[in-house]
Image (spheres, rainbow, N blue to C red):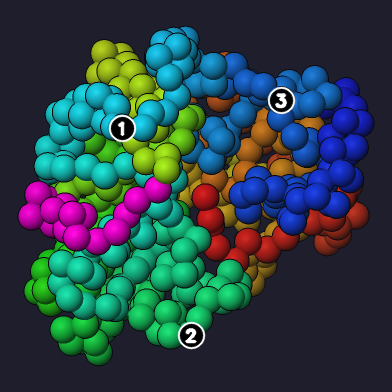
């Protein structure tokens, strides 16, 4: 596959300005330049259409990042745009609630049967934190058991030493992390904190898929110990299926949190659940100026309607399986210690050294060589309805070319020799 002839002049100029104006040079960790190969990966994107994006220098890429997950139908999607423009003509936000708050709640219940009531947010952290506050109020308990990434707020990020600077110890002492696919680790927390755990909150998919009925075991343990079971569907919601992971894995949580894919790029998240628990939001404080913002809700109503009327999930699974299987076949062919794991709709790419530890130099070389061939991705690949077979084939062609060079670098024992910029920074977690 041909290496693109690119210049990144404007990207580099913007990056230098950002170093003076923006801490970490990005508003989101996963978009920060240090998570890519600076000088090779463009710093800024200017526009998108379908599954293609263009950087500020006009270079075109096939995007397998989907803006960290919100883009599910594709960039610049006609029906989403039309819905937003129609609402924009009426107004962006009002001094009283918008009818869309009720309209979306009604159509939402058809997709998520246990969504008796709903409260809106703008991003995942809003609603995971709101769900925890409601759970604490409902149970009268303070402690939380969590598994995975649930946002940047103190209660959640406190279990990650790499990200917990500034979090008071008094807060971090109330949160306990258990291991994914290890129900015994959750049981241990519940037993060591009898009558204290307000909620068990977890991602349905955390890099790998659940094994041995893991989700249901966690739910059963939560109920046994009087804790609420909260499913974090910020990433899985409306991707794995129309009803998200709850539908896909056939599980009904007490509360569930959604975001990203539901509005195809507009800022929107929400927490739903059983009425007796959701009524707790009449007591706990969860309020902010942009709650129920109409543009995001208009986009969400349209996105849900489009998903119901078109084979969105069938197509994404087909493309995802093609990419997932193709990647692993190529890794085996070239002897790469890399693997696509988890679900085919957003597989996580792992890169290991000879001792089985994460190899950021191998990962860096992969990011470098794929972007030079017009493929923009990160450690977690996202599939959208806009991705077609031709795009997946181009992804796999870029992967094969990259693996050829990576194989040579591994054989020489000098990965850094082939890097054209600093290696990607260690993540320490997988923030959205």
> Which residue range is magenta in the image?
274-288
Residue 337 lies, in percent from the top left, at 62, 55
The label number, if any, that marks residue 46 in the structure image: 3
The label number, if any, that marks residue 190 in the structure image: none
Q: Point out the tag, 1 or 2, that comes first from the N-terminus.
A: 1
Does residue 53 lie above or below 332 as drawn? above
Category of crowding for the residue at label 2, using alpha-carbon neighbours closer than 10 angstroms: few (below 14), some (14–19), many (at least 20): few
Residue 294 included in the magenta stretch of the image: no
Near-viewer residue (341 or 381): 381
Category of crowding for the residue at label 1, using alpha-carbon neighbours closer than 10 angstroms: few (below 14), some (14–19), many (at least 20): few
Total label count?
3
Of badges 1 and 3, the one in the foreground is 1
Of badges 1 and 2, the one in the foreground is 1
- 58 vs 97, left or right, is right
> Distance between the Cα atoms at labels 1 and 3?
34 Å
Residue 428 lies, in percent from the top left, at 60, 66
Is the residue under label 3 in contact with that under label 1 (CB below 8 Å)? no
Q: Secondary structure at mark 1?
A: loop
The label number, if any, that marks residue 96 in the structure image: 1
The quarter of the rendered structure image containing the N terminus is top right
Near-viewer residue (56 or 402): 56
Q: Dot 2 corresponds to which residue?
A: 169
Near-viewer residue (399 or 170): 170
Q: Secondary structure at mark 3?
A: strand
Residue 303 lies, in percent from the top left, at 35, 22
Of badges 2 and 3, the one in the foreground is 2
Residue 66 lies, in percent from the top left, at 54, 33
> Distance between the Cα atoms at labels 1 and 2?
40 Å
The residue at 18%/37% (across/down) is: 112
Is the residue under label 2 in contact with that under label 1 (CB below 8 Å)? no
């Amino acid at each position: 596959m041909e290496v693109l002839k690119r210049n990144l002049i404007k990207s580099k100029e913007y990056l230098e300005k950002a170093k003076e104006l923006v801490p970490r040079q990005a508003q989101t960790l996963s978009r920060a330049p240090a998570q890519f190969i600076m000088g090779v990966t463009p710093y800024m994107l200017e526009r998108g259409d379908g599954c293609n994006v263009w950087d500020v220098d006009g270079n075109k890429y096939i995007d397998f990042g989907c803006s960290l997950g919100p883009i599910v139908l594709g960039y610049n999607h006609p029906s989403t745009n039309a819905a937003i423009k129609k609402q924009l003509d009426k107004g962006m936000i009002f001094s009283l609630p918008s009818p869309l708050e009720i309209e979306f709640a009604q159509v939402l219940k058809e997709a998520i049967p246990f969504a008796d009531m709903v409260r809106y947010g703008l991003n995942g952290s809003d609603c995971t934190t709101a769900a925890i506050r409601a759970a604490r109020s409902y149970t009268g308990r303070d402690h939380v058991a969590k598994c995975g990434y649930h946002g940047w707020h103190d209660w959640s990020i406190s279990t990650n030493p790499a990200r917990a600077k500034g979090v008071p110890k008094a807060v971090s002492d109330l949160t306990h992390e258990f291991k994914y696919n290890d129900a015994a680790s959750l049981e241990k927390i519940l037993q060591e904190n009898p009558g204290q755990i307000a909620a068990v909150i977890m991602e349905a998919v955390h890099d790998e898929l659940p094994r041995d009925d893991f989700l249901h075991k966690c739910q059963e343990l939560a109920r046994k110990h009087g804790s609420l079971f909260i499913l974090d569907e910020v990433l899985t919601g409306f991707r794995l299926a129309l009803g998200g992971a709850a539908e896909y894995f056939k599980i009904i949580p007490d509360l569930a949190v959604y975001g990203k894919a539901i509005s195809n790029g507009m800022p929107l998240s929400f927490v739903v659940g059983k009425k007796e628990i959701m009524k707790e939001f009449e007591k706990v404080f969860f309020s902010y100026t942009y709650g129920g913002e109409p543009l995001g809700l208009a986009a969400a109503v349209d996105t849900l309607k489009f998903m119901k009327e078109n084979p969105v999930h069938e197509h994404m699974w087909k493309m995802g399986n093609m990419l997932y299987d193709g990647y692993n076949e190529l890794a085996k062919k070239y002897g790469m210690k890399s693997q696509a794991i988890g679900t085919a709709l957003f597989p996580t790419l792992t890169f290991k050294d000879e001792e089985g530890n994460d190899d950021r130099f191998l990962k860096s070389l992969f990011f470098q060589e794929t972007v030079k061939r017009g493929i923009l991705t990160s450690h977690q690949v996202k599939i959208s309805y806009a991705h077609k077979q031709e795009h997946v084939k181009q992804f796999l062609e870029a992967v094969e070319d990259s693996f050829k060079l990576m194989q040579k670098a591994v054989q020489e024992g000098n990965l850094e020799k082939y890097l054209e910029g600093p290696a990607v920074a260690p993540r320490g977690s997988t923030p959205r």
